[in-house]
Image: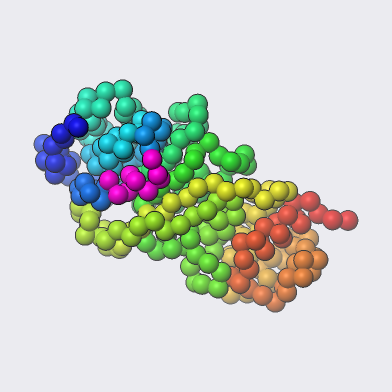
Amino acid sequence: MTTLPPLREVIARHGLSASKALGQNFLFDEQLLDRIAAIPGSLDGAKVLEVGPGPGGLTRALLRAGAEVTAIEMDRRCLPALAELEAAFPGKLKVIEGDAMKIDPATLFDGPYHIASNLPYNVGTALFTGWLSGEAWPPQWSSLTLMFQEEVARRIVAEPNTSAYGRLAVLAQWRSKAKLALKVHRSAFTPPPKVMSAIVHVVPGEAPAGVSMRVLERLTEAAFGQRRKMLRQSVKGMPGAIEALERLGIDAQRRAETLTVDEFVQVARELTAPKD
Ligand SMILES: C[S@@+](CC[C@H](N)C(=O)[O-])C[C@H]1O[C@@H](n2cnc3c(N)ncnc32)[C@H](O)[C@@H]1O
């Protein structure tokens, strides 16, 4: 097995002081990184997209697990450290210097791939919702293993009738299975962020038939936009929504957070193909 220098030494040698603007909180604990890389299951021979490899902590764990990694990093200061990893795992790591917000991962792979990332917090949710929002389903990615602030992770896996339940939960659960895979203490990062973190693992499920993603999005936006109001108030601007609730026997006096993901799907289906 290739022996790599400790990550702290890599950071020091390349002068990689953490940049707040780039959401840089690095992980150095190799055991923890190996545990994270194990979350998707066996990666031996699998293709993996990593966003924000930084000095390459998670990258080396993914490579150790046998993955072929394509990594997108915005901070060019990290490139020499990543070049050392490329040399240690010949042909297994491709580094793209750029902004992950501007790169469609589908253009990087011609087959299935996993996404694993200790996401920069400032763009994490936007990247995540983008990966979940394609009309075509199943997506080309086979799984997402992503670090979030714990509060965001809890919103992704939230159940109805909780304050964390909202648009993010419906988006993440209506045609995917999302679970909280690992809590990560703030002290595991350098520098430690103000809040705790957690890793969410998502795999695509079956897409319910006859439901448009856009309609579901508009519905949840309206319903949770006024989450304290009854549905008859919050969704009244959506033509046909009140009638759809009636047809389905869903009491319009309920509030958005009491509807299950399946109930949102049923309403969206009615609105996707309105009845006469
Ligand atoms: C939380 S750090 C994680 C670093 C490393 N993977 C680790 O676990 O120690 C986030 C990384 O994402 C990079 N980054 C921030 N915004 C980015 C973007 N829009 N596209 C690509 N990389 C980005 C940062 O430079 C940083 O290296």
| 178 sits left or right of 254 in the view | left
Q: Nearer the viewer, residue 146 or 38?
A: 38
| 140 sits left or right of 54 in the view | right
Quick check: is 24 in the magenta stretch?
no
| 59 sits left or right of 234 in the view | left
- Viewer can see residue 145: yes
157, above or below 60, in the image = below
- Viewer can see residue 242: no
In the image, what residue occupies the spot 48% across and 59% down?
A: 156
In the image, what residue occupies the spot 61% across and 41% down?
A: 137
Residue 206, given in percent of the width and then of the height, sits at 62, 47
Residue 229, given in percent of the width and then of the height, sits at 63, 74
138, above or below 70, in the image = below
129, above or below 259, in the image = above
Which residues make up the magenta segment?
A: 34-42
Q: Residue furthest right?
A: 276
| 76 sits left or right of 139 in the view | left
Q: Nearer the viewer, residue 249 or 253?
A: 249
In the image, what residue occupies the spot 30% across and 63% down?
A: 195
Residue 176, given in percent of the width and then of the height, sits at 55, 51
